[in-house]
Image (cartoon, grey):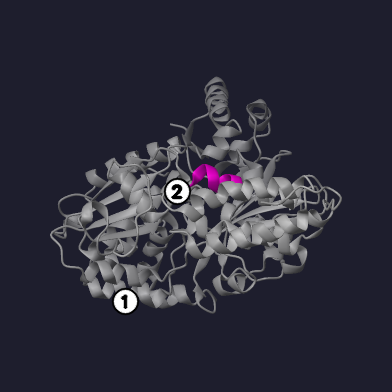
């Protein structure tokens, strides 16, 4: 029997959008016609999104990548003997030697794009389950101690020390506790959660299971946004495998400790990325912010102690347990320890997932990894941290990606998303968009957010129209101060960040609209 050649074709949503299914089907057809013995593995993406679909072939010298591959390229690839890594204009060589990938420090994403997402054996072969194996040798305080030693801070945006939440839930007295994963990845320009759930779902399952052991929770929920159908399917397929292999269930890995996970779909509200709104939605109610206290760690889902963390926070846990908290803390700078999965998007030549230790500058990410703008025009601004993040001009691009360094420049890292803009961007319109976004997505519970965002849109319209711009900009500043101080959650409280950064860092986009002769009273 002829040797079977493995061919990896990503099933990641970005690759599917670029025709990966057609490529896989064409490979099967051509292989059958030529009598070639192949096996197609639908892996995740390695994150080099401008090269998707990036097809990899297992050869005697290792995997050889080709990309971006279209279905129309497949016959010429076979003709070029690509099953043996033959030369072709799309040949990229060994993927791990592509500079964009070789320069990264992949801990959380070490397996994504490499393994079969639904093969637990594949997962174990690349170091998976070592964290859970280690956790099962420790008691609950011992697991929390490793998380504390790692310096891990919540990757969802707030940067709160993860171990404090874990320890609070662990110490809480209750007949039942929960672990909830916030997978409602709604920030513009972010896709790290989706990539991991589609390409390496066992990492999330392992991280949540370790959290269950640490806190005493027996049930976990993944709250997933409905716009991620591939991730929903991938998680459920992986959960079936995990239960069948004894990772989940009445006795995790024959430990006698129960833990299981369910996936629940959200309905598409941005506010449900806020943890208390998420819990309301998970309970079957409308997604509305809860007042704190009590905090969810003491009174969360169904009134029980609940650990709520983001996908990237849970996904960091297996590496931390298997290598030790201190090893994780050796990466990074200051109080920002470990690695940050950066998502580079917008008007940029080479967008994708970049995992690096905290401390790299924004400029290095945009210029060295991104290669400048897709349009070829100069970079003018970058928004970091999603739609509630600050717009940074070139003079701030040397700021290191670090929670404190960004806060000192009135910015925030958020979920690690970076959206690049060229010199055609209008920052006054972007400031208006921030208010508009908040008005559309506010849950409506508190007045500063509900009313403030709407008044913000109206006032920015006057500024853009040149109606007493200085006076109306003064009103915008007052409004931002009220929203910051008076909003119940980060939705209203952080909307002023993009608005004020646009005004302060790009005043020319507001001043050029000054038309003092137009005498309409500002409200």
Characterize the local packing of mark 2: few (<14), some (14-19) or many (20 or more) Cα atoms within 10 angstroms: many
Q: Tell us which disc is closer to us: 2 or 1.
A: 2
Q: SS at mark 2?
A: helix
Q: Nearer the viewer, residue 70 or 299?
A: 299
The residue at 73%/58% (across/down) is 471
What residue is shown with label 1?
A: 145
Q: Nearer the viewer, residue 250 or 468?
A: 468
Q: Nearer the viewer, residue 106 or 264?
A: 264
Left or right position of 92 against 441: right
Q: Position of residue 393 (x, y in %)?
A: 74, 62
Q: Position of residue 410 (x, y in %)?
A: 62, 68
* Separation of residues labelled 2 and 1 (CA atoms): 32 Å
Q: Earlier in the sequence, mark 2 or mark 1?
A: 1
What residue is shown with label 2?
A: 271
* Viewport quadrant of the N terminus: top left
- Number of marks present in the image shown: 2
Answer whether residue 120 is visible to the viewer in this image: no
Position above or below: 63 against 101: above
Which is the main secondary structure of the residues drawn in magenta?
A: helix
The residue at 41%/44% (across/down) is 117
Q: SS at mark 1?
A: helix
Position above or below: 49 against 479: above
Left or right position of 465 against 283: right
Left or right position of 125 against 475: left
Answer whether residue 335 is visible to the viewer in this image: yes
Q: Position of residue 64 (x, y in %)?
A: 60, 46
- Magenta region: which residues? 436-444
């Amino acid at each position: 029997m002829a040797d079977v050649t493995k061919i990896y074709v990503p099933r990641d949503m970005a690759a599917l959008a670029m025709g990966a299914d057609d490529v896989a089907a064409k490979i099967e057809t051509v292989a059958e016609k030529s009598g070639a013995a192949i096996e197609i593995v639908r892996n995740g993406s390695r994150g080099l999104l401008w090269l998707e679909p990036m097809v990899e072939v297992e050869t005697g010298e290792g995997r050889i990548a080709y990309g971006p591959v279209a279905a129309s390229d497949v016959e010429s690839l076979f003709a070029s003997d690509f099953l043996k890594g033959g030369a072709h204009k799309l040949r990229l060589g060994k993927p791990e030697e592509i500079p964009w990938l070789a320069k990264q420090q992949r801990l959380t994403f070490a397996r994504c794009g490499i393994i079969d997402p639904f093969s637990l054996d594949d997962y174990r072969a690349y170091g998976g389950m070592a964290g859970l194996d280690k956790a099962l040798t420790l008691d609950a305080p011992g697991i929390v101690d490793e998380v504390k030693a790692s310096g891990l801070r919540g990757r969802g945006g707030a940067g709160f020390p993860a171990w404090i939440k874990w320890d609070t839930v662990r110490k809480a007295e209750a007949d039942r506790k929960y672990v909830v994963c916030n997978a409602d990845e709604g920030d513009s320009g972010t896709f790290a959660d989706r990539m991991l759930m589609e390409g390496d779902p066992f990492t999330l399952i392992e991280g949540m299971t370790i959290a269950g052991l640490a806190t005493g929770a027996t049930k976990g929920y993944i709250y997933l946004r409905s716009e991620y159908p591939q991730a929903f399917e991938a998680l459920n397929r992986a959960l079936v495998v995990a239960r069948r292999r004894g990772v989940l269930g009445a006795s995790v890995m024959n430990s006698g400790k129960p833990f299981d996970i369910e996936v629940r779909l959200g309905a598409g509200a941005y506010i449900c990325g806020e943890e208390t709104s998420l819990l309301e939605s998970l309970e079957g109610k409308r997604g509305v912010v809860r007042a704190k206290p009590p905090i969810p760690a003491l009174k969360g889902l169904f009134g029980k102690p609940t650990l709520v963390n983001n996908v990237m926070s849970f996904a960091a846990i297996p590496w931390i347990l298997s290598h030790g908290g201190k090893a994780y803390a050796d990466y990074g700078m200051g109080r920002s320890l470990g690695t940050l999965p950066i998502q580079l998007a917008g008007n940029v030549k080479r967008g994708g997932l970049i995992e690096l230790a905290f401390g790299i500058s924004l400029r290095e990410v945009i210029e060295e990894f991104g290669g400048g703008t897709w349009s070829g025009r100069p970079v003018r601004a970058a928004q970091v941290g999603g739609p509630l993040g600050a717009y940074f001009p070139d003079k701030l691009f040397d700021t290191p990606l670090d929670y404190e360094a960004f806060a000192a420049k009135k910015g925030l890292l958020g979920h690690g998303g970076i959206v690049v803009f060229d010199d055609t961007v209008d920052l006054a319109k972007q400031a208006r968009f921030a208010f508009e976004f908040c008005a559309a997505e506010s849950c409506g519970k508190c007045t500063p957010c509900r009313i403030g965002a709407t008044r913000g849109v109206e006032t920015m319209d006057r500024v853009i129209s040149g109606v007493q711009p200085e006076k109306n900009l003064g009103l915008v500043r007052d409004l931002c101060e009220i929203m910051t101080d008076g909003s119940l959650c980060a939705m209203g409280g952080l909307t002023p960040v993009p608005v004020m950064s646009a005004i302060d860092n790009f005043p020319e986009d507001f001043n050029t609209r000054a038309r003092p002769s137009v005498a309409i009273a500002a409200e």
